[in-house]
Image (cartoon, grey):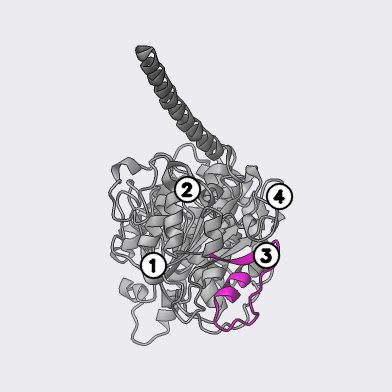
Amino acid sequence: MARAPKKKKAEKPKGGGDLDFAADLFKAADKMRGNLEPSEYKHVALGLIFLKYISDAFEAQRAKLAKEEYADPEDPEEYLAANVFWVPKEARWSHLRANAKRPEIGKLIDDAMEAIEKVPTNERLKGVLPKIYARPTLNKTMLGELVDLFSNIGMHDAFDTARDLFGRVYEYCLSMFASSEGKRGGEFLTPRSVVRTLVEMLEPYKGRVYDPCCGSGGMFIQSEKFIENHGGRALDIAVYGQEINNTTYRLAMMNLAVHGIEADIRWNNEGTFHRDEHPDLKADFILANPPFNISDWGGDRLKDDARWKFGTPPAGNANFAWLQHIIHHLAPRGAAGVVLANGSMSSQQSGEGEIRKAMIEADQVDAMVALPGQLFYSTQIPACLWILARDKSANGLRDRRGEILFIDARKMGHMIDRVRREFSEEDIAKIAGAYTSWRAQEPETPYVDVPGFCKAVKLETIREHGHVLTPGRYVGSEAADEDDVPFEERFTALKETLTEHFAESEELSALILAKLEGIGAHG
């Protein structure tokens, strides 16, 4: 865990204006989608936003180079040095806008995407951009109207300001599409307030940041924003990630490019467990929201894997495989924040309780945060945050070995619509503030236990509770409701317990029958 420089006061987000603009833009764009499903339409809309962004970035850099005496505005290498993609003439937004009303606009956009990918200096975009616009099922009038609509983004701003606006528009549209898609939306986007909470707790100022299941890249974007808001340099972190879904991987690459972030994000269809794209990486910070309770992760083929330092994870649930994969990739002083299903805090079935016990006894768990329900696109059930640390005495922070901080945030947040909850800035500050003051050597506000909210607990007490990590057991609030754990997890646990009882019953019956036969033989 890298020691943070002294904070300056965090800047407030730049007014509601930009977000209002993004919301209005999304509403206008959404009206055009006709009979397209949100899952399909998001690639149409986000691909065009990306194309507009890189074209504007190119034109801004071109104008800058034209004013420099020894620069060559026609040399792609000049753009690469400035982290700007070279955009061929046929792919520039001005060309597409001029032809927006033509029936072949779909083919022109596909050709533009293809031309950008073919530029040698744009190698990291190869295979990333959507080429879906010439499909007969796509309404070309709607497409032309989208081109006109997106022409307004960044149009009247200096490019640095425009890039921030592009990022906000892209991020807002991603979140709205995720909300529209419900459960499927959770596959590519972790809600912003959850990511913000993790980032504010871990404070990734400097070093290598890794996400083994990175979705559309939100963890990385919030990390960079955190650094910028606290007076640091975004170049002080290096970003690494992996994603199993190719469509989501492409969203991530475009998202990071729109935010001006260079990253080593990789994709393969085998996934992080079976084909780790960063096998030798030791990260200073890991931020992850793995899919909850995955039962078909192929664990039976990885029984002797070197990552399972604390015990072999059950083949029927990947939760403790993710936790151990993440610990395996932490640097000696690294820290991680992981979103997981609530069952991971208390489950005893299939050896999970023993793995959790081993992790706790090895002092790898730093803090636990119980979250409220309805925070996520993919599920209404509450989840939790695991904060992990390889060395709890490192980096000049307060030595917290033999102790875990528990935070119960189940009652926090506010409803933003009928089905989804969100943390406010105050909520995030309260959760992160409790953790950072507990960890800091000289906190601005000294840490104190707050009944019903947070409590620092010694390992001896956690042992008394059977190494269960549910915050409600320790902070003084009421015990966790049974509904905090999904029905599937409770059903599986009950089924396994019942099976064990049946097996014991059969053994006992056989023993009694044997004894009775013995008595009969001697009678």
Amino acid type at image mark 2: Pro
Taking the spot 57% from the left edge, 51% from the top edge, the residue there is 383
Q: Residue 514 versus residue 446: which sits nearer the camera?
A: 514
The quadrant in which residue 521 appears is top left
Q: Secondary structure at mark 2?
A: loop
Among numbered discs 3 and 2, the one appearing first in the sequence: 2
Distance of label 4 from label 3 (alpha carbons): 18 Å
- In the displayed structure, 41 sits above or below 61; it is above
Taking the spot 46% from the left edge, 60% from the top edge, the residue there is 360
Q: Tag count in the figure?
A: 4
- In the displayed structure, 299 sits above or below 448; it is above
Among numbered discs 4 and 1, the one appearing first in the sequence: 1
Please state which of the two labelled residues, at mark 2 or mark 4, is closer to the viewer.
2
- Can you identify the residue that label 4 sits on? 417
Callout 3 touching callout 2 (CB < 8 Å): no
**Region of the chain picked out in magenta, as a range:** 433-458
Report the quarter where the N terminus lies: bottom left
Amino acid type at image mark 3: Asp
- Can you identify the residue that label 3 sits on? 427
Among numbered discs 3 and 1, the one appearing first in the sequence: 1
- Can you identify the residue that label 1 sits on? 85
Among numbered discs 4 and 3, the one appearing first in the sequence: 4
Q: Residue 184 versus residue 435: which sits nearer the camera?
A: 435
- In the displayed structure, 131 sits above or below 286; it is above
Amino acid type at image mark 4: Asp
Q: Secondary structure at mark 3?
A: helix
Disc on res. 291 = 2
Distance of label 3 from label 1 (alpha carbons): 39 Å
Amino acid type at image mark 1: Phe
Among numbered discs 1 and 2, the one appearing first in the sequence: 1
* Left or right for 141, reference 78: right
Q: Secondary structure at mark 1?
A: loop
